[in-house]
């Protein structure tokens, strides 16, 4: 019998093998998705850096033992990964994004304001009280799906509610792709409850209306790192706390937490795909309707109405889907209309100018 001595040698034993230390890059959120875009030579010549802050005078980036600034010129979002060109920082190469929260810049045809990139999970937060609203949750979830970020619903203030189950049930019924968690954000084990999505190297963000407990959750995740979190918010002159810049903060364990004011101003436009993802069941049914343009009202061969009659689809869900899709169309079209109005105005100016020049020429 050959005796295996390895168990007596901690460094060789299979049980006691210490996990390889996480690299500085991994602690900044570097993942296989980004690594697969870079070859070894590029990695050595232009080290990867992550955009941790975006402001008017440029972007702060962090890499392995590196903290730098990129002057304005590149269109960057907090969370972006770049291959940093030390000689010409604005020539740094942007790596493909895993996900992107963006919103249309007002009045611009195809110009987007980039809010946050490469977020892995977004916690859609609401509380177990009058703030709870399925339609509002669906709005945030559609935005998450559109941005290709995995959403998780967090129901806070569980401690102020006699029975959280009805809230959990309603939230759970929205989509089987979205986990639901009820918690006391103030005194509960927040890190434990959110652990599945908060492993080192992950990037998270929060969505939700004011007062539902987003900062409370963030503070709980930072735990003992109180000093670090106090930098997240600053009191303005009136004593209200306000979020300062578009920033990303890291816990000691290597969890990246996004704190960007833009997350509050996300609007539901250009989110058709996100809505279709969220309401995949309704979309699938609609595809089975006899008529392509079925309004699911009185048409014969309507699979949607049939599902409602069979008790397989909640008519309230169909109604919310319609409203959300209409809101999205409205927002998207309104901007498109504004665009064509601007074009018409531009054309008018050109015509007037031409006519004017023509007149001058004739003189
Ligand atoms: N009892 C209880 N109070 C909570 C809970 N979550 C948040 N609160 C309280 O609710 C209030 C608002 O919480 P915040 O964390 O500031 O909410 P927010 O979503 O960050 O709000 P904005 O900064 O306005 O977006 C604070 O007084 C919190 O202490 C909870 O689970 N239980
Ligand atoms: Zn139909």
Image (cartoon, rainbow, N blue to C red):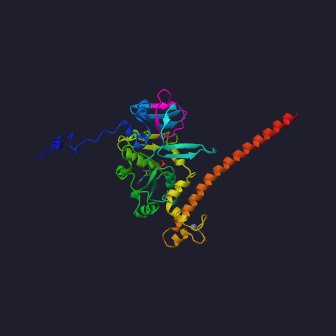
Q: In the image, what residue occupies the spot 40% across and 43% down?
A: 32
In the image, residue 172 lies at what x, y percent?
Answer: 43, 61
In the image, residue 7 lies at what x, y percent?
Answer: 17, 44
- Between 37 and 332, the one lying in front of the other is 37
In the image, residue 67 lies at what x, y percent?
Answer: 43, 31
Q: In the image, what residue occupies the spot 82% across and 38% down?
A: 356
Q: Is residue 225 above or below residue 153?
A: above
- Between 206 and 101, the one lying in front of the other is 101
Q: Is residue 352 above or below residue 323?
A: above
- Residue 88 belongs to the span the image colors magenta: yes
Where is the C terminus found, in terms of image quarters? top right
Residue at the outermost left position: 1
Q: In the image, what residue occupies the spot 50% across and 30% down?
A: 89
In the image, residue 359 lies at what x, y percent?
Answer: 85, 37
Residue at the outermost front position: 1
Q: Is residue 130 above or below residue 41?
A: below
Image quarter for residue 272? bottom right
Asked whether the viewer can see residue 139, the reply is no
Magenta stretch bounds: 68-90
Classified by dominant secondary structure, the portion drawn in magenta counts as loop
**Left or right: 137, with 27 as reference point:** right
- Between 1 and 222, the one lying in front of the other is 1
Residue at the outermost top position: 87
């Amino acid at each position: 019998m050959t005796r295996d001595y390895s168990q007596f040698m901690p460094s060789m034993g299979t049980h006691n093998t210490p996990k390889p230390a996480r690299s500085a890059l991994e602690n900044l959120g570097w993942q296989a998705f980004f690594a697969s875009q870079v070859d070894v030579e590029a990695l050595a010549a232009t080290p990867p850096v992550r955009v941790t802050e975006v402001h008017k005078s440029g972007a702060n980036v962090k890499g392995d033992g590196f903290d730098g600034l990129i002057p304005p010129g590149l269109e960057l979002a907090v969370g972006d990964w770049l291959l940093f060109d030390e000689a010409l920082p604005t020539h740094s190469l942007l790596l493909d994004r895993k996900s992107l929260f963006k919103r249309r810049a007002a009045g611009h045809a195809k110009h987007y304001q980039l809010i946050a990139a490469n977020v892995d999970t977004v916690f859609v937060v609401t509380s177990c009280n009058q703030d709870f609203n399925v339609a509002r949750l669906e709005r945030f979830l559609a935005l998450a799906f559109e941005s290709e970020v995995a959403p998780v619903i967090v129901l806070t203030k569980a401690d102020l509610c006699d029975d959280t189950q009805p809230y959990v049930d309603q939230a759970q019924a929205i989509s089987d792709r979205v986990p639901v968690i009820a918690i006391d954000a103030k005194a509960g084990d927040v890190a434990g409850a959110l652990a599945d999505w908060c492993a080192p190297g992950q990037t998270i963000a929060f969505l939700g209306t004011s007062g539902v407990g987003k900062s409370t959750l963030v503070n709980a995740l930072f735990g003992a790192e109180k000093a670090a979190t106090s930098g997240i918010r600053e009191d303005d002159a009136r004593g209200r706390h306000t979020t300062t810049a578009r920033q990303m903060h890291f816990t000691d364990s290597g969890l990246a937490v996004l704190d960007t004011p833009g997350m509050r101003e996300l609007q539901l436009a250009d989110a058709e795909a996100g809505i279709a993802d969220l309401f995949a069941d309704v979309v699938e049914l609609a595809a089975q309707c006899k008529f392509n343009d079925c309004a699911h009202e009185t048409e014969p061969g309507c699979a949607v109405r049939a599902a409602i009659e069979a008790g397989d689809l909640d008519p309230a869900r169909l109604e919310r889907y319609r409203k959300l899709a209409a809101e999205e169309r409205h927002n998207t079209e309104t901007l498109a209309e504004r665009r064509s109005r601007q074009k018409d105005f531009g054309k008018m100016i050109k015509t007037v100018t031409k006519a004017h020049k023509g007149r001058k020429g004739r003189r």
